[in-house]
Image (cartoon, rainbow, N blue to C red):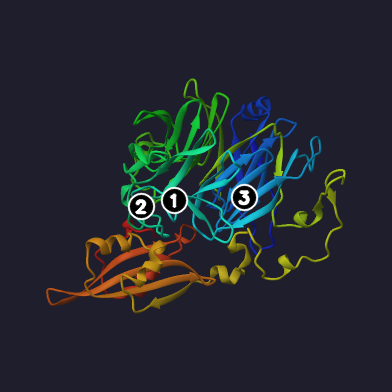
Amino acid sequence: MTNSTDTQQHSTTRPQPEVTMLGSNELWAWLNELHISLAFTTYQTNRLFLIGCKPEGRLAVNERLFDKPMGLYAHNDSLYMACRYQLWQLENRLAAGETYQGGDRLYVPCTAYTTGDVNVHDVVLDKQQKLLFINTDFSCLATLSPGYSFQPVWQPPFISKLVAEDRCHLNGLAMQDGEPTYVTACSRTDTAAGWRNHRFDGGIVMHIPSNAIIATGLSMPHSPRWYRGKLWLLNSGTGEFGFLDGEQFIPVTFCPGFVRGLAFIGDYALVGLSKLRSTTFAGLALETRLAAEGNTSQCGLVVIDLNTGTVVHWLHIEGVVEELFDVVVLPNVCQPRAVGFQDDEIDRLVSFPDSGGLIITKPTVKRPSLSQPLSTAGLPRSLHTSAADKLTINYQRVYHLNPENLAAYESMTYPSLQSRWQTQAQRGELLAVSASVAGQMVGFAVAERFIQANVEAEELLSLFVLPAYRHQGIATTLVRHLLPTAGTHLKRDTHKA
């Protein structure tokens, strides 16, 4: 069955692209039988999805926009969600037996903690109800602390310094008996973005209490979860769902996508699938296997029977959404909904003790946040730029560069220049050109001009364009501005462009 999404629209000059979902024939019946709903995030298109059941046998899909939602955690009547620079708590505002527009849960953004853009991945509550999260940019497990963006709780012993360099791509956290116990990382490197050179077999699992690496040889592992006496995880680069038996990863099910996001209910596992990106995911064993089978990567969810390892239900997603990050199960929920920031629901829905339920106040005549170019906390930044700003790409030369001041641009370099300087000395003058949209850098190219055999030469060292702005000719224009006449020594297909 095909299900169209129930979407709040923001006032823009362009309509939001359509998202379509196709569920397997028995998915609705399975959700209804277990009396559960699902929630999942996709930072690629700034969306939180809530999936439940309509009475007539169709899936209920509720979609809301947030700014880069990633890690998601469900606890009692709340959802905790990591966004670009905030951790949000969304709280159910419906009393038992109360409904709103057919929904039996209404998750309302109630509390936000500002962490800064530290690339938070998994987020959980421990047994003391303390919020813990994987701070990927700073390569540590962290929590909140008054007066600070975050407080480090633990870091891998091979990480020598807490700096915003995403040194090992620490990404996943597994709890055992309410305590943080296991983490996944893409490598054990201690250099800026060093994990990018170890995507194929550099992935590890660590045991937090002992600081021990308990599994190696994995390919971009994600989403470790302790369930029924086993540590389950996703070997994302191979597309495999499995568990650890001692130091050995035991594959259970192959999935046709980059697996990321894992949850359990009863005898079933739910696994998120993402399509393969041409750069970060290029050359992985998953890509090779899919090509050999004549298949392509998929975006969506699969339900796996833990007793047989077979996929028993699935949800395919098409349209603008190509990647998922995290998925959670919502027990005893039939049709969940959420309030976002796009329309006046968040203004008008009010409750208080002894109010007798949710109160809908009178509509506002004019909402300044929609009629004026003001920023709204939690909304994707792209919603607040004009159509002209979205289409205008500005190119600018960057002068007086050296390895030290280039460190500030590390997140916009590929291959990593900070890694390069550790093995190769600067040979000559560094040249750079940036591309920006609405004042935000979206692309960056760096080259080096030097003398070789008494002849002046130029080499392209780094070329990077943000994923949302690729396939628009930005990379080609950056190189043309940077090296208008010279050839380059580095092939284009090695860059994030």
Give residue 324's position: percent from left, percent from top: 52, 45
Q: CA distance from mark 2 to mark 3?
A: 43 Å
Q: Residues within 10 Å of mark 2 (few under 14, many from 20)?
A: some
Give residue 141's position: percent from left, percent from top: 47, 48
Q: CA distance from mark 3 to mark 1?
A: 37 Å
**Given contact means CB atoms under 8 Å apart, are the residues at marks 2 and 1 in contact?**
yes
**Given contact means CB atoms under 8 Å apart, are the residues at marks 3 and 1 in contact?**
no
Give residue 68's position: percent from left, percent from top: 56, 54
- The amino acid type of the residue labelled 3 equals Glu
Q: Residues within 10 Å of mark 3 (few under 14, many from 20)?
A: few
Which residue is nearer to you in this view: 146 or 89? 146
Q: Is residue 258 visible?
A: no
Q: Residues within 10 Å of mark 1 (few under 14, many from 20)?
A: many
Quarter of the image where one finds residue 405: bottom left
Please state, as top left, top right, bottom left or bottom right, where the N terminus lies in the image. top right
Q: In terms of secondary structure, where does tag 3 sit? A: loop
Please state, as top left, top right, bottom left or bottom right, where the C terminus lies in the image. bottom left
- Circle 2 sits on which residue? 159
Give residue 433's position: percent from left, percent from top: 38, 73
Disc with the residue nearer the chain's start (2 vs 3): 3
Q: CA distance from mark 2 to mark 1?
A: 9 Å
Which residue is nearer to you in this view: 28 or 211? 211
Residue 140 tag number? 1
- The amino acid type of the residue labelled 2 equals Ile
Left or right of 145, for residue 463: left
Disc with the residue nearer the chain's start (2 vs 1): 1
Q: In terms of secondary structure, where does tag 2 sit? A: loop
- Circle 3 sits on which residue? 18
Vertical side of 488 occupied by 183: above or below = above
